[in-house]
Image (cartoon, rainbow, N blue to C red):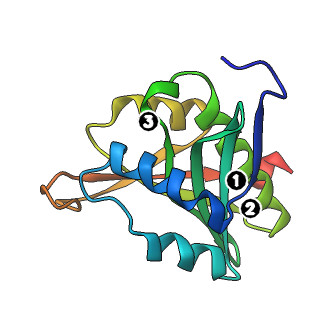
């Protein structure tokens, strides 16, 4: 775990994209492209954030919030920094923004085989709401998860 204050979470900028893309490519077989992140940065309903550790981008989350629902579109921590509380810090910041935007629920999709992420989301208050069969390019299912933001205000 990182000591409080050693992880700075701030809005993602264009200058962060080289680092963000390197983490994305190290983490996913079908990574988002540069254009995906530019779109998130320019959308009035998207709130991409980065976690900066010791001056370098160590993770990020892309949140979309529209009306009563917020959705985590993408969240990842650099492989060498996982298990240190960075993803939880990103989730906390995303939930705070979602509440500011008056969202009542936060949703996400996660690979059914990603046990570490599922455990993190469940500890954070997400629960399973369904399955999207054969959602990923390799035909793996996606678990649909949701968290109420109503009691968190």
Q: Residues within 10 Å of mark 3 (few under 14, many from 20)?
A: some
- 102 is higher (above) or lower (below) than 18: below
Pointer 1 residue: 94
The residue located at (85%, 63%) in the rendering is 100
Residue 130: quarter of image: bottom left
The residue located at (38%, 64%) in the rendering is 32
The residue located at (78%, 40%) in the rendering is 8
The foreground one among 89 and 145 is 89
Between circles 1 and 2, the one closer to the viewer is 1
Residue 26 is situated, as x and y percent measured from the top left of the image, at 34, 43
Alpha carbon separation for disc pair 1 and 2: 6 Å
Nearest to N terminus: mark 3 or mark 1: 1
The residue located at (44%, 35%) in the rendering is 117
Residue 36 is situated, as x and y percent measured from the top left of the image, at 46, 73
Secondary element at tag 2: helix
Residue 2 is situated, as x and y percent measured from the top left of the image, at 70, 20
Residue 104 is situated, as x and y percent measured from the top left of the image, at 72, 63
- 113 is higher (above) or lower (below) than 11: above
Secondary element at tag 1: helix
Secondary element at tag 3: helix
Pointer 2 residue: 98
The foreground one among 37 and 62 is 37
Nearest to N terminus: mark 2 or mark 3: 2
Residue 117, numbered circle: 3
Q: Marks 1 and 2: CB-CB under 8 Å?
A: yes
Alpha carbon separation for disc pair 3 and 1: 16 Å
The foreground one among 65 and 76 is 76
- Image-based side of 64 in relation to 121, left or right: right
């Amino acid at each position: 775990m990182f000591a409080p204050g050693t992880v700075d979470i701030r809005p993602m900028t264009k200058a962060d994209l080289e680092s963000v893309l390197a983490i994305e490519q190290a983490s996913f077989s079908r990574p988002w492209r540069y254009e995906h992140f530019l779109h998130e940065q320019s959308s009035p309903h998207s709130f991409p954030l980065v976690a900066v550790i010791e001056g370098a981008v160590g993770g990020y989350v892309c949140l979309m919030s529209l009306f009563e629902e917020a959705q985590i579109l993408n969240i990842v921590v650099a492989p060498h920094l996982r298990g240190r509380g960075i993803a939880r810090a990103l989730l906390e910041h995303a939930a705070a923004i979602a509440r500011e935007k008056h969202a009542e629920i936060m949703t996400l999709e996660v690979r059914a085989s990603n046990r570490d992420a599922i455990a993190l989301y469940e500890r954070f208050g997400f629960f399973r709401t369904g399955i999207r069969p054969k959602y990923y390019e390799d035909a793996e299912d996606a678990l649909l998860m949701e968290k109420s933001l109503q009691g968190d205000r």
